[in-house]
């Protein structure tokens, strides 16, 4: 149950945080293209996460469990660090730097997907959070860690779709709506970082 809740929490954080893909999808919503918006929001992350899942799985097959355990501490500290840094940055500048193009092109979708793939948070998640959990699966059976990834999928895509609807509703009502989503998601990130550190310590 703890893995399910942790995975769902991580997924919700990722889904709540507006990204270039969210902005491309939002532009499609404005054009009344909801199906295209959902495909943009879901399709690209599935491709990115699927590739990184395979990469992480094979990487951690050869990493000793003891090392993976200490990597988990790095993951918890990184989550807290990312959340704290983002909260500090929110006080210094607005979050208007995301994709603003209303046109959905192969180029814009490719750039948004590349941004998703190369974002530091993506690699921190897979190598220092999901990776050590996969290493636990190598020891105890992979079926035991399925709840983490199932919860992460449901949490991410559920939150991403809710965020898309909320952005479509809030964009015309409150120009600081995106900043509030950032605030909520980064506070959750801090909480999850602490939770993950506690779990890593108790698993020692």
Image (spheres, rainbow, N blue to C red):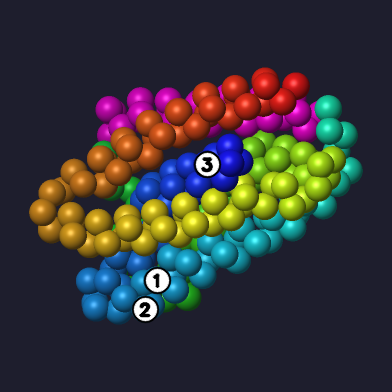
Please say if the residues under marks 1 and 3 sit with CB atoms less than 8 Å apart: no
Residue at 54% over, 51% down: 151
Disc 3: which residue: 5
Neighbour tally class for label 1: few under 14, some 14-19, many 20 plus, Cα within 10 Å: some
The secondary structure that dominates the magenta segment is helix
Neighbour tally class for label 2: few under 14, some 14-19, many 20 plus, Cα within 10 Å: few
- Closest to the camera, between mark 1 and mark 3, is 3
Q: Is residue 59 in view? A: no
- Give the residue furthest to the left: 173
Q: Is residue 90 magenta?
A: yes
Q: Is residue 3 magenta?
A: no
**Quarter of the figure with the C terminus:** top right
> Which of the two discs, 1 and 3, labels the residue nearer the N terminus?
3
User: Where does the magenta region start and end?
Assistant: 67-93
Residue 101 appears left or right of 78: left
> Which of the two discs, 3 and 2, labels the residue nearer the N terminus?
3
Q: Label 2's element?
A: helix
Disc 2: which residue: 35
Which disc, if any, is residue 38?
A: 1
Q: Label 1's element?
A: helix
């Amino acid at each position: 149950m703890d893995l399910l809740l942790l995975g769902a929490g991580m997924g919700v954080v990722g889904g709540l945080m507006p990204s270039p893909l969210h902005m491309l999808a939002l532009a499609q919503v404005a054009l009344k293209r909801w199906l295209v918006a959902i495909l943009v929001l879901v399709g690209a992350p599935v491709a990115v996460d699927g590739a990184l899942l395979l990469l992480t799985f094979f990487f951690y097959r050869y990493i000793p469990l003891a090392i993976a355990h200490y990597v988990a501490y790095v993951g918890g500290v990184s989550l807290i660090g990312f959340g704290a840094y983002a909260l500090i940055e929110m006080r210094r500048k607005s979050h208007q730097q995301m994709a603003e193009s209303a046109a959905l092109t192969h180029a814009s979708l490719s750039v948004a997907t590349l941004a998703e793939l190369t974002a530091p948070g993506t690699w921190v998640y897979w190598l220092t959070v999901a990776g050590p959990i996969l290493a636990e699966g190598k020891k105890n059976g992979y079926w035991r860690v399925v709840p983490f990834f199932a919860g992460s999928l449901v949490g991410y895509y559920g939150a991403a779709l809710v965020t898309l609807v909320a952005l479509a509703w809030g964009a015309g009502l409150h120009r600081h709506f995106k900043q509030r989503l950032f605030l909520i998601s980064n506070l959750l990130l801090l909480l999850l970082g602490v939770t993950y550190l506690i779990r890593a310590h108790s698993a020692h």
